[in-house]
Image: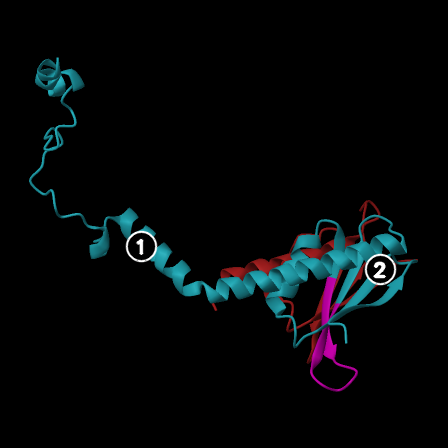
Chain colours: A cyan, B red
Amino acid sequence: MAQHTLERFDANTNTAVLSLDAGVYPIDAVYGAAYALIDRAFVLLDKEANPSGKGSRFLVQLRGKRTLDQAAVEALSGEFGNELLSQALRRKVVKQNNKIIEEIVTQAIAGATGASLPQDFVDDDDDDLDFLDDPLGIAVPWEEKFKTDTKKGA
Amino acid sequence: MATQHTIQLHRSMYMAQAVRDAIRVFEDFANFAMVSDEHHYTVTIQDVDPEVDGDLAGEFCNFALAHTIERKRRTPK
């Protein structure tokens, strides 16, 4: 059985009604897909018991803001279906990575407020060094550094 | 003849406050009445201002839906 179907199309009122299995799509995914189409269509959401008697289904009424033929309404319905899947997947990914996201945000906020960082981030090796110190001799010009060696080699 | 629109918004999908907000925004252009039963908020729209260009009932539905979504996103779960 299809999980979302074009239930009916009325050319006179420029309206298509889709039905979605409420057990398959979370309500937030339906909201997200509806929100994405709100600039092109009038959207009305409803919910009713499944005709089979098991569970319930969402009814999504899409009415084009401009006059649409059946092909255009079917395309709009297909777009709604794609957006629905995209929203459902995004929710799943966010749910799976929720802990990592929270940890990154926590560290970012802690860093911004100047709170103590985790030990991994603290470099305590060079506590006595000034920014003018040059223990590795990086600031010494090349000629100065290799002057004697060049003379020896010549 | 005055037209009347009756819109049924499911209580589990639309927030009452969002529907009331929509009525407040559009009430300058028509008369609204809202009643609620077990499953739906039923909104009746009458006496739409003849100056209104466009689909008032459709815009009302979109406004109520958009505000419901925005309010739910702001509300921590």
Q: Residue at 61% across / 58% down in the picture?
A: B67
Which stretch appears magenta?
A44-59
Q: Where is residue A102 in the image (x, y as percent from the top left)?
A: 38, 60
Q: Does the magenta stretch include residue A50?
A: yes
Q: Residue A107 carries which label?
A: 1
Q: What residue type is labelled 2?
A: Thr
Q: Does the magenta stretch include residue A81?
A: no
Report the quarter where the N terminus of chain A lies: bottom right
Give the quadrant of residue A24: bottom right
Q: Residue at 67% across / 75% down in the picture?
A: A22
A31 vs A61, left or right, is left
Q: Residue at 54% across / 66% down in the picture?
A: A92
Residue A114, compared with residue A1, is above or below; it is above
Report the quarter where the C terminus of chain A lies: top left
Residue A39, compared with residue A43, is above or below; it is above
Query: In the structure shown, which secondary structural element does the residue marked by tag 1 occupy?
Result: helix
A50 vs B20, left or right, is right
* Chain letter belonging to callout 2: A
Q: Where is residue A70 in the image (x, y as percent from the top left)?
A: 89, 56
Q: Nearer the viewer, residue A142 or B33?
A: A142
Q: What residue type is labelled 1?
A: Gln
Q: Position of residue A28 (x, y in %)?
A: 60, 66
Instruction: Determine the main secondary structure of the stretch shown in magenta.
Output: strand
Q: Residue most toward the front?
A: A154
- Residue that carries the numbered disc 2 in the rendered image: A15
Query: In the structure shown, which secondary structural element does the residue marked by tag 2 occupy?
Result: strand
* Chain letter belonging to callout 1: A
Q: Residue most toward the bottom?
A: A53
Give the quadrant of residue A18: bottom right
